[in-house]
Amino acid sequence: SSEDELRQRTSFLRSKGISSFNLVNKSNKDETLKHARIIEDEFSLAPCTESNEKDRHTRESGKNGDVGDLDNVDDSSVDDGGGVSICAHYSIKYHKSRKLDGAFQNLQDFVERMEKEQQQKHDSRSSSSTTTTKATTKNELLLITGSGPKGKLDSLSALQRLQKESNIDTTVSSSSSNIKVGIAFNPFFPKEDEYEVEKERLLEKLTTGRVDKVYLQFGTDLERLSSALQFLTELKQQQHRTTSIAAATTMSSTSSSPPSSSSCIPNFEICGSIFLPTKKLIAQQKFRPWNGVFLSNEFLSSTACARSIVLQMMRIYNKFGCEILIEAPGIRNEKDWLIVESLLMDRDDDDDGGNDEV
C-alpha cells in the first residue's frame, strides 16, 4: 500500500540521517496531515541506525504520502535521536470552494488542525515519563497559490487575512502560532518587470508578520541567484537593526510615530532548491518543463553540465548559510543518495566555507 511505501521510504531516509521532510500538495485529495503522522510514528519506533556528519542538513518530501519529491540538505535537520521536522505544503489552488469565503475557511481549518495536533503532541510529551521515545515534532506550513488562473484568494491575500484574523503585532515578532509558515519566492523570471513584481509580492508577504521561512524556486541563472540571496540577506540584516532600534525607542521615548515598513518584517530563514542532475530529470524538463521553472540550454545539454551548475548553486547557498531543498523526484534509492553524497563532498572540497545554519 502507499502507506507501507511511505513507512519504508521514511525508514530508508532516516537511516541516512534525514530528519526533516516536506509533503507536497498536488491534489485536493491529499491527506497531508495523515502522512505527517505516519512519518512521526516511524521516528518514534526506533533510533536512527546510521548518520554521517557530511550528510546532515537533509530534508525530504513528497506528494500523496510519497516522501521524496523534495529533499532538503541542511545541517539543521540532522537526526538527534528522535526529533523530526515536517513541512506540509498547502496549495490554495487545490482547496477552492463555492461557498462564500470558503477558500479562506478551508485554510483556517487546516491551520487549526495543525495547531491542535501540535498542542496534543506537546501535552502528551509533557505528561509522559522521561523515558518516552515519542519523537519531538516541529511543524511548518508552506503556503503557495498554485499554478494556473488565480482565484480571489492567493498566498498574499491569505497571509494578510491570517494576520488580520490573529491581530498580530508585526513590529514585535513573527507568527504567534505554534506553526511556522513558509512562502515561495521565484527570483528567476527572465523579464525584469516580472521579477520586480515578484519582489514586491515578497515584501508584502513578509510585512504581514506571518512568514518564518522563504523557499526559493529552482532556476539556473547563477548571477540572479546571488543577487536575490544578497537582497534577502539585506532584508534580514535590516530586520535585526530595526528591531534593536525599536526596542531602544520603546525604552527611551514615548513617541507614537508609526514604524517603518522594514520594522514590520520578522526574522526569517532561507531555503534554496536544487534538482538532482540525472538523465531522467533532464529528459523530463525537456519534454514537459514545470511551470515557472527557468532552465538554461546549458543545464539541459548534459548531466555533466547540469551537475556543474547544481554544484555552483550549492556553493552559493552554502556561502549565504541556506538550507537546500532537493526537488522531485528526490532521493529514492541508494543511487540517488550517492549523488547527494558526491555533490556535498565536492561542494565542501572546493568551498571556502560558510555558515551551515540560517
Image: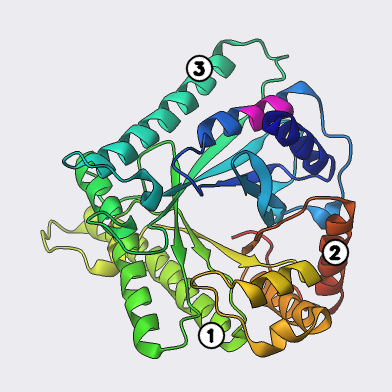
- Any magenta on residue 339? no
Q: Which of disc 2 and disc 3 is earlier in sequence?
A: 3
Does residue 86 appear to the left or right of 299 in the view shown?
Answer: left
Q: CA distance from mark 3 to mark 1?
A: 45 Å
- Residue at the spot of label 3: 123
Q: Quadrant of the C terminus?
A: bottom right
Q: Which of disc 1 and disc 3 is earlier in sequence?
A: 3
Secondary structure category for the residue under label 2: helix
Secondary structure category for the residue under label 3: helix
Can I make out residue 278 in this image?
no
Residue 142 in the image: x percent, y percent? Answer: 47, 50
Q: Amino acid at mark 1?
A: Arg
Q: Are marks 3 and 2 in contact (CB under 8 Å)?
A: no
Q: Are marks 2 and 1 in contact (CB under 8 Å)?
A: no
Residue 353 in the image: x percent, y percent? Answer: 75, 73
Determine the main secondary structure of the stretch shown in magenta. helix
- Residue at the spot of label 2: 339
User: How packed is label 1: few (under 14 Cα within 10 Å), some, or many (20 or more)?
Assistant: some
Q: Amino acid at mark 2?
A: Ile
- Residue at the spot of label 1: 224
Q: Name the residue at 68% across, 44% down.
A: 67
Q: Is residue 216 above or below residue 140?
A: below
Q: Amino acid at mark 3?
A: Asp
Q: CA distance from mark 2 to mark 1?
A: 26 Å
